[in-house]
Image (cartoon, rainbow, N blue to C red):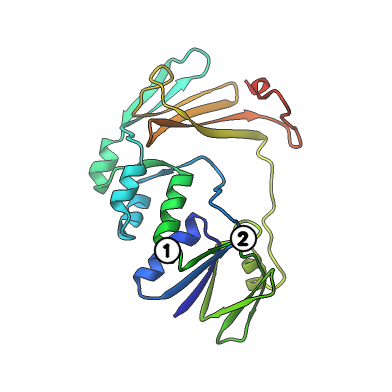
């Protein structure tokens, strides 16, 4: 079959590679003009890594993944460790190590494996139509493409989902009462052991670091914040 996928994120690109391996002619379109993933990193647990292994990306994903041997929880007030446990039983039970990876690195790998001949950026889909046999997508520039099957991987405000659900079903955003900040920094053993996912909690707040490739930590912190609040020029007030 000729399969059109709208959305070149982790989900869309992974689906494209899987369908290519099954012998289908796949083309992926995305309105983004360059790889700019949302979020800093992902924790790929053993079951997810096994899927990527099946996609033929085992060695590449292992190279992108940080070495994570243990997980620990600690007090945010004084750093006292509450628990520190090994992930070796997970690896032993599944036959696969988990890997924290930088999201941009993973997405770049997936997009590269899809192949430039099958991946087209800067192409925004504005309409979908099907006649029961073929499906056609129309782009913002007026051009069209047709296939036997259309997969929507175009995010929370999916145009493809609106077509499939007729009346359109948009997800309702509900505030959790927390603000999350995340990013990548140089790994430093003064912060936490380099092979440990460490989480500090207390007073309704949470902060964590986990290792990714390139001697980096993926970090994030969650702080209580009312809906509609804006962090302006001084993010240190979130402490």
Residue 18, x across and y down, in percent: 39, 66
Seen at 55% across and 34% down, the residue is 182
Q: Is residue 212 left or right of residue 96?
A: right
Residue 215, x across and y down, in percent: 38, 30
CA gap, disc 1 and disc 2: 17 Å
Q: Which mark is residue 152?
A: none
Q: How crowded is the residue under tag 1: few (<14 C-alpha within 10 Å), some, or many (20+)?
A: some
Which is more N-terminal, label 2 or label 1?
Answer: 2
Q: Is residue 164 left or right of residue 226?
A: left
- Circle 2 sits on which residue? 31
- Circle 1 sits on which residue? 115
Residue 10, x across and y down, in percent: 48, 55
For residue 231, above or below residue 79: below
For residue 83, above or below residue 178: above
For residue 117, above or below residue 93: below
Q: How crowded is the residue under tag 2: few (<14 C-alpha within 10 Å), some, or many (20+)?
A: some
Secondary structure of the residue carrying tag 1 is loop
Secondary structure of the residue carrying tag 2 is loop
For residue 42, above or below residue 132: above
């Amino acid at each position: 079959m000729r399969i059109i996928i709208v959305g070149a994120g982790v989900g869309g690109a992974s689906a494209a590679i899987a369908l290519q391996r099954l012998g289908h002619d796949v083309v992926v379109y995305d309105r983004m003009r360059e790889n700019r993933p949302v979020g800093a990193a992902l924790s790929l647990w053993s079951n997810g890594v096994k899927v990527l292994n099946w996609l033929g990306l085992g060695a590449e994903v292992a190279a992108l993944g940080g070495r994570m041997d243990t997980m620990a929880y600690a007090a945010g007030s004084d750093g006292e460790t509450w628990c520190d446990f090994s992930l070796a039983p997970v690896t032993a039970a599944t036959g696969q190590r988990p890997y924290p990876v930088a999201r941009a690195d993973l997405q770049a790998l997936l997009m590269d494996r899809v192949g430039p001949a099958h991946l087209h950026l800067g192409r925004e889909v504005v309409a979908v139509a099907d006649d029961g046999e073929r499906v056609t997508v129309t782009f913002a520039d007026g051009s069209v493409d047709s296939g036997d099957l259309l997969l929507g991987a175009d995010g929370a405000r999916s145009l493809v989902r609106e077509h499939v659900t007729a009346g359109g079903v948009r997800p309702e955003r509900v505030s959790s009462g927390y603000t999350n900040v995340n990013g990548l920094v140089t790994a430093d053993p003064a912060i936490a052991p380099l092979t440990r996912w460490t989480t500090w909690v207390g007073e309704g707040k949470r902060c964590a670091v986990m290792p990714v490739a390139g001697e980096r930590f993926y970090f994030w912190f969650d702080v209580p914040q009312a809906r509609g609040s804006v962090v302006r020029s001084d993010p240190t007030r979130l402490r």
